[in-house]
Amino acid sequence: MWGGGAERRRGAGAGILLAAALLTACNTPAVPLAGTTAVSPARVLVAAPDMADQPSFATRTGRPPVLSLQELFHPTYTVPLDPSKIRTLLVTGDIIPARGVNYFATVKHDFLWPFRPTADYTKNADITYINLEAPLFAGCPVSPAASFTFCGDARFVNGLTFMGADVANLANNHLSNYGAEGITATDQLLQKNGILTSGLGPVAVIDIRGIKFGFIGFNGVGRAIDQTALKEGIARARQLADIVVVQFHWGKEYERQPMPDPGVPTPDDPVNIGHEAIDWGADIVIGNHPHWYQGVEVYKGKLITYANGNFVFDQMWSEETREGVIGTYTFYGTQLVAASWKPVRSYDYGQPVFMNAQDSAATLQTMEAASDTLATRLHEPTTSPVPSYPPPLPYAPEHAPA
């Protein structure tokens, strides 16, 4: 036992001597090895960590990133080119083939005329969803005069099929301008030509390679939206579809921000209604009616678009009412992973044409700034940096550039 203690003491003493030797070595200038003439380029061989060169969330996990305004307006995620995973939904602004649009199409004997410059684009999606805001029937009065009683020739249905419309929302304040008879005639005309309808009760369901989209619509212009019917409609669509798309006709006209309009009356705040729709199970919310495009919102990871502006209409009296955006929404499985907006401007009282690059950039900057204004008000994340509003575009010539 005593011998073991001695061994431990000798070991401890040796450890002290070794530590002292190491300490001395650390404080003694290093002697270069014989023949060494250059210092190793450590900074080149071992770079400092740079988080910007790390794999993205999508690359690391194989899953798309969470939706955000930043990702929508400044995307970094590369959507896989895999048709088994990807579905696209294209949505237009208001289509009102009435009044001046109906007059000029009739004079030209061409009911495809409003859609010709954009049809190749609008038909190039899995589903094209429109808001049709005028009944269509044979014998619609033809007049360009100012009127708020809208209808269009039944032959406009050929234009809708030409531009690739798959579903038409009929829940709006002008579809009923010719009563129940006009609504029924329009619904039957569309269904006969292969275009489903939303807003009349039944859920419009389209199966795209095994993923079912369900479409419902509600009008909140001139009356409040029936929230019980909204909740029940979403629940019914949820039972029938994998992706629930809800379109609303709502909000105050000629505004860049979503808001109620007590004077019409349009009493619902679109923000509140949009949030409720998401809370109750909608996957994406589409808004129309204000005749100006507005910003978008990401609420609980879901997209709310408040207004796409005009698509086909004769409102040539201001530059803003001639403008609109066509939204394309890309789903990876059932998750929305990307969105893009294609700005258009109407010419000749009813024909939308894609904007040039400079005007498109200004439109998208305005849309982003409007989205950030709303996000700031709602204490939600904005894009970074937050852009300023560009000057409004000047009033364009009446006729489209050749």
Image: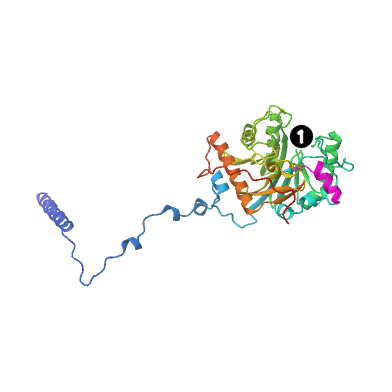
What secondary structure is found at the residue carrying circle 1?
A: loop
Categorize mark 1 by other alpha carbons within 10 Å: few (<14), some (14-19), many (20+): some
x, y percentage for residue 202? 76, 38
How many callouts does the rendering have?
Answer: 1
Give the percent coordinates (x, y) of residue 204. 74, 42
Q: Residue at x 52, y 35 (%)?
A: 379
Find the residue positioned furthest to the right.
Answer: 139
Magenta stretch? 95-108
Residue at figure coordinates x 83%, y 37% from the top left = 183
Q: Nearer the viewer, residue 401 or 40?
A: 401
Q: Which colour style is shown? A: rainbow
Is 103 a magenta residue? yes
Q: Is residue 28 left or right of residue 245?
A: left
Q: Quadrant of the C terminus?
A: bottom right
Can residue 98 be seen by looking at this rendering? Answer: no
Residue type, mark 1 in image = Asn
**Is any part of residue 256 visible from this angle?**
yes
Quadrant of the rendered image containing residue 236 = top right
Point out residue 261 in the picture as x, y percentages from the top left corner: 68, 29
Based on the displayed image, in which of its 4 quarters is residue 275 positioned?
top right
Residue 245, quarter of picture: top right
Return the residue nearer the eye: 186 or 365: 365
- Residue 127 lies, with reference to residue 278, above or below; the image says below
Spot occupied by residue 72 in the image (x, y as percentages of width and height): 58, 47
Front residue of 294/298: it is 294
Our reading of the magenta stretch's main secondary structure is helix
- The residue wearing badge 1 is 173
